[in-house]
Image (cartoon, rainbow, N blue to C red):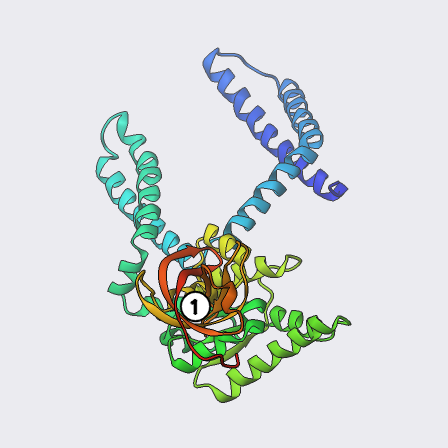
Amino acid sequence: MISKGVRLAISFFWLLVFFAATFYGLVALQGIIELTFTPLERIIGLVIGSGLGFTIGYLTAPRLMKRVSQFTFWIEKSLQRTPFQDIVAGAAGLIVGLIIANLLGAAFSRIPVVGAFVPTVGSIVFGYLGVVVALRKREDIAGLVPMLPRLRSRSSLDKTVPAELPRLGRPKILDTSVIIDGRIADICKTGFVEGPLIIPGFVLDELRHIADSSDTLKRNRGRRGLDILNRIQKDLPVSVEIYEGDPAPGMEVDAKLVRLAQTLGGTVVTNDYNLNKVAELHGVQVLNVNELANAVKPIVLPGEEMIVYIIKDGKESGQGVGYLDDGTMIVVDGGKKFIGETVGVLVTSVLQTAAGRMIFARPKYSVDKVAP
């Protein structure tokens, strides 16, 4: 429900519109059909027109305000989902397009009949083209103007993140799962991660909440995550910054991470499959540590030999199962009788699945039993 004051303000606005329309309508009628209105008739006409405008405004105010509220909410949501650099590029393209349309409109304005419509049509066409071209070519434009990347970085980052950081590379925004996993620390140690690591405040809050959980397993995972962060910040040669802002109040952590990545122009680092897909749908780049681990596993080809320790039997009859140091499962056909032994095997096939790589092999020879 809208307030009575807003409703009256809208009503008086429509009163003035209808008052002006009635006044100029009477003048036009008097000139067209050569009618002569007495002062009293003019007053009565203005009163009727104004009253009609006030009534229409009063009755339509709730629906009008609802439509306006929905429209402004849609615009706000659209702007929040749009990266800041896209907004700047679109605005610049619109300005350039309108300037071109104004110059062409001035040149064609003296043409009879058509000249009056050229500026309007040109503004619509060239304004649209300016926005589209600027959005598609924003990286090229930024490369031509050296100041644009610097201005974009300073305007998009939160005040808690220094403006110099983007020069080192795109910010890497860590989520809770990848912090608890811990492998991100080893990756940072190797120097493969470029750019600052951004730790959102809401991710720290979630880690603290997990570390204070009554469940022993959750509590240990939360404390491990905090220890990993301390290790990254103190012992590794990588810049770590804490982002204290809340880019999407009231929304879930995954939605906040995606919104933050859009705002900072950064990359989300995660192990979460669902977050990975959601971020990709929003056009946000994702670095998945699990995918990286699968990618750097050594390639094994059929016919190669290897040594494996058989630790248990497999699902099929007679199979034995062992693991490589990186966790890759090796299924040995006929290896059940070698459980507890280290044997030489010959690779027969390799299967790549969503969970990782599986190697199938058969025994080649037996060696002395050793401890696992």
Amino acid type at circle 1 is Ala
Say if residue 107 shows up in the picture. yes
Residue nearer the viewer, 43 or 210:
210
- Residue 59: % across, % down: 71, 29
Question: In the picture shown, does residue 363 fall above or below 351?
Answer: below
Question: In the picture shown, does residue 274 fall above or below 168?
Answer: above
Is 371 left or right of 218, judged from the image as shown?
A: left
Q: Which residue is mark 1?
A: 293
Which quadrant of the view contains residue 211?
A: bottom right
- Residue 353: % across, % down: 45, 55
Residue at position x 71%, y 32% in the image: 58
Count of picture labels: 1
Question: In the picture shown, does residue 115 fall above or below 198?
Answer: above
Task: Characterize the local packing of mark 1: few (<14), some (14-19) or many (20 or more) Cα atoms within 10 angstroms.
Answer: few
Is 153 left or right of 143, judged from the image as shown?
A: right
- Secondary element under disc 1, as helix, strand or loop, is helix
Quadrant of the image containing the N terminus: top right
Residue at position x 49%, y 53% in the image: 277
Is 147 left or right of 227, judged from the image as shown?
A: left
Question: In the picture shown, does residue 99 fall above or below 10?
Answer: below
Residue nearer the viewer, 149 or 288:
288
Say if residue 270 shows up in the picture. no
- Residue 88: % across, % down: 40, 57
Residue nearer the viewer, 279 or 347:
347
